[in-house]
Amino acid sequence: MGALQLTQIVKSFGDTRVLGSVDLEVQDGEFLTLVGPSGCGKSTLLRIIAGLEAPDGGRVTLDGRDVTGLRAADRNLAMVFQSYALYPHLTVAENMVTPLRLRDLSAVERIPVAGPLISRAKRRALMEKVREVAEVLRIEPLLGRKPGQLSGGQRQRVALGRAMVREPVAFLMDEPLSNLDAALRVHMRAELSELHRRLATTFIYVTHDQSEALTMSDRIAVMMGGDILQLASPQEVYDNPSSLAVAVFIGSPR
Ligand code: ADP
Ligand code: MG
């Protein structure tokens, strides 16, 4: 059984059917990319996986557990956005612990005892984790800076770092490189592949960029008009596109 299973996922906005009936199984530790033209439903599908959007029908299963009705916070997935969504007034280190701290606080606040909300030991463990992640991403020297003092590539690493600190069961990324300039985008592709190898965690990646999908992924799901037209390795999709539409989109010599 895969790490993630989508069964007959259906979604409309008003009268517009955005997702047909999507079935998808993602293997544990796999780098799977949803690729397709703008408006084909990639972000909607990813948001449904994340729990940020509810499907009209169908089931989402994580590690064999039906999570369709669970809130995003209870799914232990990490979403990395193209906009980074960093808090401008907090340092890099604070940005990285914020989601954890909020979760810890909500647990602690139920205990009606005065005193520090997080124990010193807990705070030390958190900072240890932040440093460990920062080392992997090579952003240790940036921990005291504010997001406004960082380059686009550095901000993208911080956003990844914040996701990594949570130790999620899978990373969900929605066009995380699209705000970067072309050279940095190509560089970050290699970094993301390397990160995936090191973490050995499931990556579900969304892009409209065919070459990004072809270079980084174990498998790609080609989406059009709210359906997955083909799900296979990049080589297979490139060599044997399942339809003319897929061939044209991928740019295969067919
Ligand atoms: P993609 O990420 O592939 O570009 P989206 O999933 O963002 O596509 O959008 C798919 C379709 O659903 C588009 O036609 C978009 O306009 C529509 N859509 C997405 N989100 C909403 C929403 N919250 N309300 C209404 N329509 C939406
Ligand atoms: Mg999108």
Image (cartoon, rainbow, N blue to C red):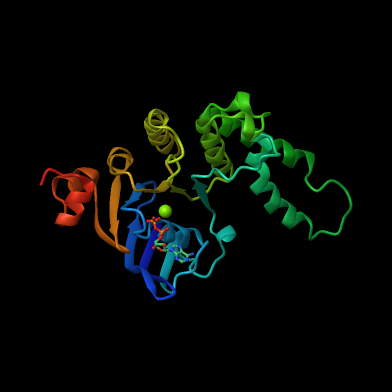
Of residues 143 and 123, the one nearer the viewer is: 143
Q: State the image quarter where residue 199 is shown.
A: top left
Q: Position of residue 73 (x, y in %)?
A: 59, 58
Q: State the image quarter where residue 140 is shown.
A: top right
Q: Looking at the image, is 47 positioned above or below residue 135?
A: below
Q: State the image quarter where residue 130 is shown.
A: top right
Of residues 224 and 126, the one nearer the viewer is: 224
Q: Looking at the image, is 23 positioned above or below residue 232?
A: below
Q: Residue at x 19, y 56 (%)?
A: 245
Q: Position of residue 26 (x, y in %)?
A: 35, 55
Q: How many marks?
A: 0
User: In terms of image quarters, where does ligand 1 lie?
Assistant: bottom left
Answer left or right for 137 relative to 235.
right
Answer left or right for 145 relative to 117.
left
Q: Does residue 95 show up?
A: yes
Q: Position of residue 67 (x, y in %)?
A: 49, 66
Q: Does residue 242 show up?
A: no
Q: Quadrant of the N terminus?
A: bottom left
Q: Residue at x 68, y 35 (%)?
A: 91
Q: Position of residue 23 (x, y in %)?
A: 32, 65
Of residues 110 and 87, the one nearer the viewer is: 87
Task: Identify the residue at the far left of this view.
Answer: 254
Answer left or right for 11 relative to 117.
left
Q: Residue at x 66, y 33 (%)?
A: 146
Q: Residue at x 70, y 51 (%)?
A: 102
Q: Looking at the image, is 14 positioned above or below residue 227?
A: below
Task: Identify the residue at the far top of this view.
Answer: 141
